[in-house]
Image: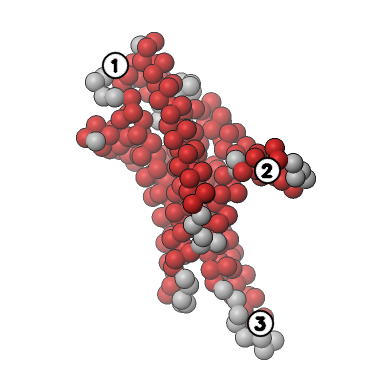
């Protein structure tokens, strides 16, 4: 556990001593803030229309603001996750420290978990900026906080899943650009797999659609925790880290 903590701190420090963390946060804050503003403006506009027509204010702030914002934030993650994960091992290879790392007395699983946890914490810090926007709603209304927490849990699980895949891809190349592009391509593919269900109902199409990370996030965005969705994300995280461990093992043998 001590070695995992050492690797985690080293990775987090590398994010924040470079422009990476601040650039990603600025990019996310700008886009997420715009989505929040638009969703809130639509909610207020529709509410005023309902009040002027004498229909009252039956709209739910969770459905009209929080759920769309969380869904849009998950889309932004498609662009952020490759930029967070691409440097984890590719940078070690480029700088020539990979050989020192794999021949050190630290176990592969400790290195992998330390780097992955650092990437997840970095992603959670970025998501926290969206949470700050949504907290403004509690100053002017009474949205239900439970679906909000469930939605952020879904974002973290989805992000952890894709970051595990990005961690594996980062071990296969010394170029951060290649790792980032490949991770984005895989994440995008996992995102759109459920499109096949729009035109095909065969059993194979259902299996393909089930592999989509978007399919398993939708219940979380509605405030629902389904065991099968949690199991899917945890399984994908395990698979990504398992493949990373196998890749690290091959690097250790070559070193």
Q: Residue 119's x, y, as percent?
A: 39, 39
Residue at the disc numbered 2: 206
Secondary structure of the residue carrying numbered label 1: loop
Q: Nearer the viewer, residue 169 or 16?
A: 169
Give the quarter of the figure containing the C terminus. Answer: top left
Residue at the disc numbered 1: 103
Name the residue rendered at 44%, 49% in the picture. 156
Q: Nearer the viewer, residue 18 or 181?
A: 181
Name the residue rendered at 30%, 30% in the picture. 110
Question: Is residue 234 visible from the viewing direction of this image?
Answer: yes
Q: Quadrant of residue 59?
A: bottom right
Give the quarter of the figure containing the N terminus. Answer: top left
Q: Nearer the viewer, residue 17 or 197?
A: 197
Tag nearer the camera, 2 or 1: 2
First in sequence: mark 2 or mark 3? Answer: 3
First in sequence: mark 2 or mark 1? Answer: 1
First in sequence: mark 1 or mark 3? Answer: 3
Left or right of residue 31: residue 160? left
* Colouring rule applied to residues: secondary structure
Residue at the disc numbered 3: 50
Q: Residue 43's x, y, as percent?
A: 60, 72
Name the residue rendered at 47%, 77% in the picture. 141
Q: How many other residues sit within 10 Å of disc 3, few (<14), some (14-19) or many (≥20)?
A: some
């Amino acid at each position: 556990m001590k070695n995992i903590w050492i690797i985690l701190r080293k990775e987090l420090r590398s994010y924040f001593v470079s422009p990476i963390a601040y650039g990603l946060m600025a990019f996310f804050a700008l886009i997420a803030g715009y989505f929040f503003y638009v969703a809130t403006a639509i909610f207020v506009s529709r509410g005023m229309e309902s009040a002027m027509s004498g229909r009252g204010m039956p709209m739910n702030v969770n459905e009209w603001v929080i759920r769309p914002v969380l869904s849009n934030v998950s889309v932004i993650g498609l662009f952020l996750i490759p930029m967070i994960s691409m440097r984890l091992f590719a940078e070690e290879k480029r700088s020539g420290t990979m050989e020192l790392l794999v021949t050190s007395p630290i176990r592969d699983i400790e290195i992998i978990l330390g780097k992955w946890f650092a990437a997840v914490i970095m992603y959670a810090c970025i998501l926290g900026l969206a949470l700050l926007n949504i907290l403004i709603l509690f100053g002017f209304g009474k949205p239900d906080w439970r679906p909000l927490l469930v939605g952020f849990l879904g974002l973290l699980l989805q992000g952890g899943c894709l970051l595990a895949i990005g961690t594996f891809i980062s071990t296969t190349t010394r170029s951060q650009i290649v790792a980032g592009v490949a991770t984005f391509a895989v994440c995008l593919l996992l995102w759109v797999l459920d499109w096949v269900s729009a035109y095909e109902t065969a059993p194979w199409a259902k299996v393909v659609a089930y592999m989509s990370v978007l399919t398993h996030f939708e219940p979380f965005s509605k405030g629902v925790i389904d065991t099968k969705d949690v199991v899917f994300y945890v399984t994908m995280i395990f698979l990504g880290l398992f493949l990373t461990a196998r890749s690290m093992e091959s690097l250790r043998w070559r070193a």
